[in-house]
Amino acid sequence: MKELLEIIARSLVDSPDEVIVKQEQSGDTVILRLSVAQSDMGKVIGKSGRIAKAIRAVMNAAASKDRVKVIVDIQ
């Protein structure tokens, strides 16, 4: 899960070296905290949050295979 989010985020930003993903597990819920450079924040969120919603949709689809819930927190 963590690796998939890193791949997606690194492909969107101008500074891929500054992409950091931290993973926390709480029961059947996985919390992924995505940190990017301040200048790349708009590229990850997108207009009206469309890219962020798409990232969350992809992560939820990947998580359904493992039967866990994923929360993506963009910081």
Image (tube, grey):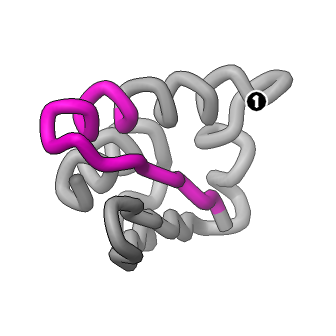
- Name the side, left or right, on which 36 lies relative to 5: right
For the point 84% across and 24% down, which residue is it?
48
Q: Is residue 50 above or below residue 31?
A: above
For the point 29% across and 55% down, which residue is it?
6
Q: Is residue 71 above or below residue 67?
A: below
* Percent position of residue 31, x then y: 46, 66
Along the viewing direction, whichever of 27 and 49 lies nearer the viewer? 27
| Type of amino acid under label 1 | Gly
- Name the side, left or right, on which 18 lies relative to 54: left
Along the viewing direction, whichever of 65 and 19 lies nearer the viewer? 65
For the point 71% across and 29% down, which residue is it?
46
- Name the side, left or right, on which 32 lies relative to 17: right
Pick out the residue farthest to the front. Answer: 27
Helix, strand or loop under label 1: helix
Q: Is residue 25 magenta?
A: no
- Name the side, left or right, on which 29 lies relative to 45: left
State the image quarter where residue 61 is shown: top left
Q: Is residue 71 magenta?
A: yes
Q: Is residue 16 above or below residue 37?
A: above
Along the viewing direction, whichever of 66 and 19 lies nearer the viewer? 66
For the point 15% across and 43% down, which residue is it?
66
Q: Quadrant of the C terminus?
A: bottom right
* Percent position of residue 2, x then y: 25, 60
How many residues crowd around disc 1 within 10 Å: few (fewer than 14), some, or many (20 or more)? few
Q: How many numbered circles does the render carry?
A: 1
* Percent position of residue 67, x then y: 22, 41
Q: Is residue 26 above or below residue 13?
A: below
State the image quarter where residue 39 is shown: bottom right
Residue ID for mark 1? 49
Q: Which residues are magenta?
A: 59-74
